[in-house]
Amino acid sequence: MIERRYILGGLALGGAVIGAPMLFAKSARPKAQAGWQLSDAEWKKRLSPLQYRVLREAATERAFTSPLDREKRAGTFVCAGCALPLYSSKTKFDSGTGWPSFWAPLKGAIGTATDRDLGYARTEVHCRRCGGHLGHVFNDGPKPTGKRYCMNGAALGFRAA
């Protein structure tokens, strides 16, 4: 007779094997709007190597390396890929994480998707127009939204007011 612990262990192992591909599944790339569906070669011409890795391959820049983390002037943060305005400097705050952080995006500027690249679900933020990866949003930000849009500085540009 098979012992109960072997049955339970087998079920747990089977569930882990079946669930593992979904747990670590690569996130689907958001679709770019018409006019912004460029080839990889076109994106590589348009962007620096770091910007390409961040915006097109969902890489993360090293913390505390972007000058935009320390940007304090009034203005607008835009997508480095297509120049779409994304965040007002009025919503920027120092999160202490080493990446530019905001408590709200501009209306209609971003899209979100579920990212499971680290083995658990996170909310990825991407540019609504070109589909470029910007960073992630977390629920540990300041009032009034309680959100922390933690963005890669390499994915952003800045236009002073």
Image: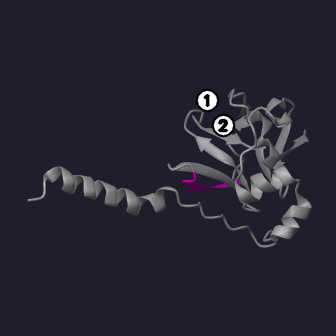
Above or below — where is 95 with respect to 103? above
**Position in image of residue 50 (x %, y %):** 83, 50
88 or 26, which lies in front?
Answer: 26
What amino acid type should be assigned to the residue bearing mark 1?
Pro
Which image quarter: residue 65? top right
Mark nearer the N terminus (2 vs 1): 2
30 or 75, which lies in front?
Answer: 30
- Which label sits on residue 19? none
Would you name the residue on which mark 2 appears? Answer: 103
Label the magenta part by its dominant secondary structure: strand
Would you name the residue on which mark 1 appears? Answer: 142
Task: Check disc 2: other Cα within 10 Å, few if <14, some if 14-19, many if 20+.
Answer: many
Which image quarter: residue 128? bottom right
The magenta region covers: 108-117
Which type of secondary structure does the marked residue at label 1 adopt? Answer: loop
Which image quarter: residue 144? top right
Which type of secondary structure does the marked residue at label 2 adopt? Answer: loop
Above or below — where is 84 with respect to 62? below
What amino acid type should be assigned to the residue bearing mark 2?
Trp
87 or 133, which lies in front?
Answer: 133
- 36 lies left or right of 14: right
**Whether label 2 touches label 1, CB < 8 Å:** yes
Residue 131 included in the magenta stretch of the image: no
Spatial distance from mark 2 to mark 1, Cα to Cα? 7 Å
Above or below — where is 12 with respect to 90? below
Looking at this rendering, what residue extends furthest in the front direction? 1
